[in-house]
Amino acid sequence: MASKKQFVVIGLGRFGGSVCKELVRLGNEVLALDTDEQKVNEFAKYATHAVVADSTDERALISLGIRNFDSVIVAIGDNIQASILTTLLLKEIGVKHVCVKARNTYHHKVLVKIGADRVVHPESDMGRRIAQQMSDENVIDFIELSDEYSIVELIASPKIEGKTLIDLNIRARFGITILAIKKGNDIDISPLPNYQISHKDLLIVIGHNDDIKRFEDQVM
Ligand code: ATP
């Protein structure tokens, strides 16, 4: 289990708000910050602390002790100038890890140049994710590790019902690895070679996207 961390979420719109709630749900400490008092009041019941502050005000950031937090998420959307200035100040103050929501590719480039540790595009990332899942009925979920490699959750088809992992010989034939198999609420990590697959088991595989596709086309 990962140890609990201390986060700051700047901007409590839909994205920042859901990041804040989920971090708290996972047991982390979260300081929620927004210029909008109504938003701050709304999040006071979720976050560990909620404060009204302007993240482009360096003195406000320093007085909140922002440097001591493990990670800061900048979820300011529309005001690109405020997002950039906030990121710059956070890195100048010495925050170790800054994750920023970008509006577009130019915004992304600037954020990387000024030292953002991670830049995310929630709307386009989610759009790609949903399209991937909808275009392939076997794919339940996936995590893109790079442009070429992914972890994919595939639903076992009736074609491989009763087959063992030895029968399928997946690693030798396709160069991909089954990390785990989910059956209902149970999860079998590193399943043994004699594991017998049932229809609707969820296979969590890691590998090159082309190899995963070959496996799906030839086996699933
Ligand atoms: P979402 O799509 O996630 O709902 P958005 O992309 O439309 O949000 P905004 O609504 O523009 O983003 O901003 C998110 C939040 O950031 C707002 O609640 C806004 O008050 C807050 N915010 C904007 N500028 C600052 C700032 N300088 N300091 C702190 N909070 C800020």
Image: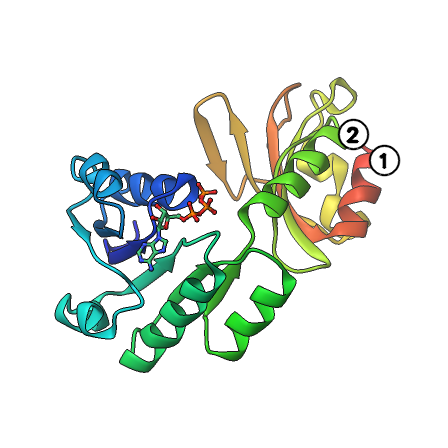
Image quadrant in which you'd find residue 45: top left
Q: CA distance from mark 2 to mark 1?
A: 6 Å
Judged from the image, the secondary structure of the residue bearing numbered disc 1 is helix
User: What amino acid is found at the position of numbered circle 1 in the picture?
Assistant: Asp
For label 2, the crowd category at 10 Å Cα-Cα, with few meaning under 14, some 14 to 19 and many 20 or more, is some
Horizontal relation, residue 136 to residue 105: left or right: right
User: What amino acid is found at the position of numbered circle 2 in the picture?
Assistant: Met
**Viewer-closest of 15 and 179:** 15
Residue 30 location (% of width, % of height): 22, 51
Judged from the image, the secondary structure of the residue bearing numbered disc 2 is loop
Please give the label number shown on residue 204: none
Residue 2 location (% of width, % of height): 30, 53
Identify residue for label 2: 220
- Does residue 176 appear in the picture of this structure? yes
Location of residue 201 with respect to 130 vertically, above or below: above
The answer to whether marks 2 and 1 mark residues whose Cβ atoms lie closer than 8 Å is yes
Horizontal relation, residue 178 to residue 68: left or right: right
Identify residue for label 1: 217
Residue at 71% over, 50% down: 176
Residue 162 location (% of width, % of height): 69, 21
Image quadrant in which you'd find residue 205: top right
**Viewer-closest of 191 and 93:** 93
Q: Is mark 1 within 8 Å of ligand 1?
A: no
For label 1, the crowd category at 10 Å Cα-Cα, with few meaning under 14, some 14 to 19 and many 20 or more, is few
Residue at 28% over, 42% down: 26
Residue at 73% over, 22% down: 157
Horizontal relation, residue 87 to residue 218: left or right: left
